[in-house]
Image (tube, rainbow, N blue to C red):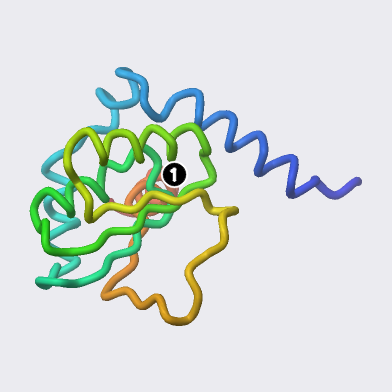
């Protein structure tokens, strides 16, 4: 049996995510303010902290952290190029200068970059959905 091509899998995932992440349907299904607020509370966000949002998608968690704690820095990374470009626009439009959105394949910040906490809101929810784990 031939091994799957990892780059092809990544490219297919990127295209799939880019097609849906900023659609009204995705927002309707995945907008869960109560869950997002619990996540932010769980992170125990501290003034001036730096937070890494892995798999930021449409920036839902990153923007939530920045809105509640404007003195923090939030870096959202994802493989979905178009979604990241849209997140950059949304951060600018909403005056969220503390949010930086980056494509995963961009140069990643070096060892000088330190985060107070890192999380993966969507990754944890999606992994838990099919595992029998309560999210």
Question: Circle 1: is it few (<14), some (14-19), or many (20+) Cα within 10 Å?
Answer: few
Instruction: Give the residue displayed 28% in from the left and 51% down from the top.
Output: 135
Residue 119 figure quarter: bottom left
Residue at the top extreme, as displayed: 24
Instruction: Give the residue displayed 59% in from the left and 53% down from the top.
Output: 105
Residue at the bottom extreme, as displayed: 111
Measured as percent of width and height from the top left, residue 74 is found at: 27, 59
Residue 124 figure quarter: bottom left
Count of numbered tags: 1
Q: Is residue 43 above or below residue 77?
A: below
Q: Is residue 91 above or below residue 114?
A: above
Is residue 62 toward the left or the right of residue 123 in the image?
Answer: left
Is residue 10 toward the left or the right of residue 80 in the image?
Answer: right
Most foreground residue, 107 or 133 = 107
Q: What residue is pinned by disc 1?
A: 130
Is residue 16 toward the left or the right of residue 25 in the image?
Answer: right
Instruction: Give the residue displayed 28% in from the left and 26% down from the top.
Output: 27
Is residue 88 toward the left or the right of residue 9 in the image?
Answer: left
Measured as percent of width and height from the top left, residue 132 is found at: 38, 50
Measured as percent of width and height from the top left, residue 102 is found at: 45, 51
Instruction: Give the residue displayed 14% in from the left and 40% down from the top.
Output: 33
Residue at the right extreme, as displayed: 1
Helix, strand or loop at disc 1?
A: loop
Measured as percent of width and height from the top left, residue 103 is found at: 51, 49
């Amino acid at each position: 049996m031939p091994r799957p091509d990892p780059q092809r899998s990544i490219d297919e995932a990127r295209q799939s995510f880019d097609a849906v992440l900023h659609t009204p349907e995705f927002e309707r299904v995945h907008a869960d303010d109560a869950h997002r607020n619990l996540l932010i509370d769980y992170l125990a966000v501290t003034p001036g902290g730096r937070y890494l949002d892995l798999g930021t998608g449409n920036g839902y968690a990153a923007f939530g952290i920045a809105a509640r704690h404007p003195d923090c820095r939030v870096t959202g990374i994802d493989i979905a190029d178009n979604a990241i470009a849209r997140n950059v626009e949304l951060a600018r439009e909403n005056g969220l200068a503390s949010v930086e959105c980056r494509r995963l394949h961009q140069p990643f910040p070096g060892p000088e970059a330190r985060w107070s906490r890192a999380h993966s809101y969507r990754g944890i929810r999606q992994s838990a959905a099919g595992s029998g784990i309560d999210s």
